[in-house]
Amino acid sequence: MLLAAAGLGLLIGLVIGALGGGGSILTVPALVYALGLDAQEATTGSLVIVGLTAAVAAVGHARSGHTRWRSGFLLAAVGVPASLLGTYLNRLVDENVLLLAFAALMLVAAAGMLIRSGDDDGTDAPDRDVDRDVDSTPPRGAGKWARVRCSVKTTLPTIAAGLGIGALTGFFGVGGGFVIVPVLVVALHVPMTAAVGTSLLVVALNSAVALAARAGQGNVDWEVIAPFTAAAMIASLAGQRVADRLPGRLLTRAFAVLLVLVACYVGVRAGLALT
């Protein structure tokens, strides 16, 4: 069990470090089907694993200057109430219904990643100013209403994404990096390198909030979670190097295929259990 937990942790950590998220969506199925936890225990344990792993990986990205602090904290802050609601709903849902919904979420994430990889030309725009959102600054000489429209254009997608990500984190125990990165890149025009670092910051903060909401309400199997988390944290440090060596499009498409396979497995198992 110890070796299995550590091995799976290495895989999840590599994915989170390389893609800025995504690995968390594999954590719950791994804990349930490979390590024998029930769905509620797995979603709680996932928050521990994903939160700590993202925090470690985020430090490395921040040191490299790849973090948009303002967007990150805004995404995390607006997601707090949604995360608390998601945590409450998690306790009300049947285990197999939760896993079936999780399988559907994995398919949606895989589709989004495939679409994103098709639009990606493999290049990143230069990240000239990591402390500023490039699309949040109106052109010089713009009038008052132009500045207001620019601010609304930036803030509304961020708030909507933050609410959705918070709900996913609380209900499913996932970090939501597979949603955060596309939002930052497409809606806020953040370069991919900065989007990954910012995503890790949001994942760590959201996981901490959702885990705090579950304090005293569920058991954490530390014999499984501790080695899984330690291995994932170590592997996340190598994830950034993997991302630097391999094409982002290849990484994204390979992970999307893996998500489809795991989603089919989880969906069939949960569906049969409900019948």
Image: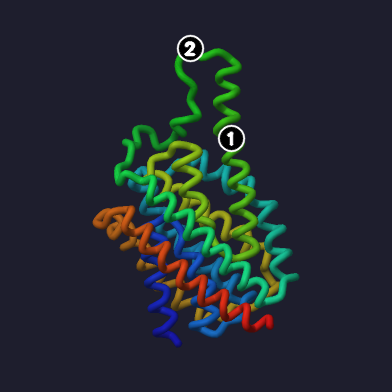
Q: Residue furthest right?
A: 92
- Number of marks present in the image shown: 2
The type of residue carrying mark 1 is: Thr
| Quarter of the picture holding the N terminus | bottom left
Q: Is residue 225 visible?
A: no
* Residue that protrudes farthest toward the left in the picture: 245
Task: Name the kind of residue labelled 2 in the image.
Answer: Gly
Identify the residue under disc 1: 155
Q: Position of residue 269 (x, y in %)?
A: 57, 81
The location of residue 27, given as percent across then percent down, is 50, 71
Q: Image quadrant for the C terminus?
A: bottom right
Cα separation, mark 1 vs mark 2, equals 21 Å
Image mark for residue 141: 2
Residue 224 higher or lower than 258, as above or below: below
Q: Secondary structure at mark 1?
A: helix
Give the residue displayed 58% in from the left and 46% down from the top: 161
Q: Residue at x 73, y 64 (%)?
A: 88
